[in-house]
Amino acid sequence: MSLWNKIMESLELKLLTSPETLKRQVRGAYCGDLLSDVLAHVAPGDLWVTIHRHRNVVAVSTLTNVSGVVITGDRYPDRETLEVAEREAIPLLVTKLNNFQASGKLYQIFSEYSQEM
């Protein structure tokens, strides 16, 4: 099973953008809702876990070269945000889990994945 598939299954993610946006390799994760903090600390290749669902999420994701955005709490972005994400090839994914639950599952996945390598 690929890492993306493992993540999507474990977090019960729904991909809102096209499957072609899942081209980037996932290297880790970062959880944060303060955009300036995310800009300063997220690493390229990270999945960004957040409650935000507005257009600025795509702008920050593009600037930081994240692998995708996991929007928690079953929150959905508007059509304009989805269109911009698609254009920028940024995967937007939604989960019913909250930030804590999603981050905990990602921590477990990456801990297991690093041991396999």
Image (spheres, helix red, strand yellow):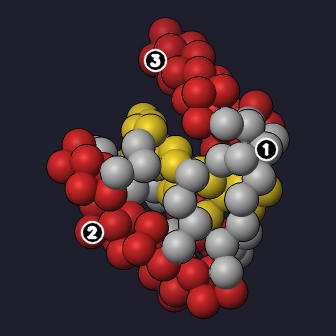
- Does dot 1 land on a helix, a strand or a loop? loop
Q: What's the CA distance linking mark 2 and mark 1?
A: 27 Å
Q: Earlier in the sequence, mark 2 or mark 1?
A: 2
Amino acid type, label 2: Leu
- Disc number lying in front (3 or 2): 2
Tell me the crowding category of disc 2: few under 14, some 14 to 19, or many 20 or more residues within 10 angstroms, Cα based: few
Using residue 12 as the reference point, say whether residue 47 is left or right of it.
Answer: left
The disc placed on residue 114 is: 3
Q: Residue at x 77, y 53 (%)?
A: 74
Q: Nearer the viewer, residue 103 or 115?
A: 103
Please tell me in which quadrant of the rendered image residue 57 appears: bottom left
- Does dot 2 land on a helix, a strand or a loop? helix
Q: Residue at x 38, y 64 (%)?
A: 61
The disc placed on residue 96 is: 1
Q: Earlier in the sequence, mark 1 or mark 3?
A: 1
Q: Position of residue 39 (x, y in %)?
A: 24, 55
Q: Across the whole image, how many numbered discs are drawn on residues?
A: 3
Q: Position of residue 115 (x, y in %)?
A: 49, 10
Amino acid type, label 1: Lys
Q: What's the CA distance linking mark 3 and mark 2?
A: 27 Å
Using residue 115 as the reference point, say whether residue 32 is left or right of it.
Answer: left
